[in-house]
Image (cartoon, rainbow, N blue to C red):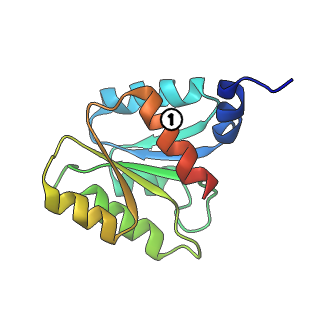
Amino acid sequence: HSRDQSTILSSQILGAKIWFVDNDLGICEAMRLLMTRWGCEVITASSYDDLRELADLQHGECDLLLVDYHLDNDQTGIVVAQQINENRRVAIPTIMISANYKQELREQCKENNIFFLNKPVKPLKLRMIMQQCIRQ
């Protein structure tokens, strides 16, 4: 008897360690609640510096990095992902979430091996992408 599809799916992100960076604290909290419900361990931060205080960016265990594109002080999620990954032995799979629909942003993400998702993000779609990223 095969287990139903959702059980198989959820087991892939169960216990996953997620770092989530967004300068909107409301979004941070909503995403933390959502991903915690899926069984993930989530650290949310409003910026690179904020995350650096909460996690060991170089050696800390992280299965997936989620970043918003527009952060405070003209920082972008792409730069944050680059800063984190350039100091790690193995880059963390990264998902960019943005309300920006510009093609050049999509291309920038592609060049940096970053998955791109447009806001508003539907939970089911997010979960599928997260699973894909973690499986790789």
**Can I make out residue 75 in this image?**
no
**Residue 50 drawn at (x, y percent):** 39, 50
The outermost residue toward the right is 1
Return the residue nearer the eye: 46 or 116.
Answer: 116
Residue drawn at 61 percent across, 35 percent down: 40
| Residue 126 in sight here | yes
Residue 134 position, x and y percent, is 59, 51
Residue at label 1?
127
Numbered disc 1: secondary structure: helix
Instruction: Say what amino acid the circle numbered 1 marks.
Output: Arg
- In this rendering, position of residue 56 left or right of residue 5: left
Residue drawn at x 19%, y 49% as measured from the top left: 72
Q: Residue sitting at 46 percent across and 28 percent down? A: 124
Quarter in which the N terminus is drawn: top right
Q: Quadrant of the C terminus?
A: bottom right
Judging depth in this view, the residue of 28 and 99 nearest the camera is 99
Residue 7 position within the rendered picture, expressed as x and y whole percent measured from the top left? 71, 26
Near mark 1 (Cα within 10 A), the count class, few <14, some 14-19 or many ≥20, is: some
> Total label count?
1
Measured along the vertical axis of the image, is residue 135 above or below residue 85?
A: above
Residue at horizontal 37%, vertical 69%?
82
Residue 10 shown left or right of residue 118 in the figure: right
Q: Position of residue 59 (x, y in %)?
A: 62, 66
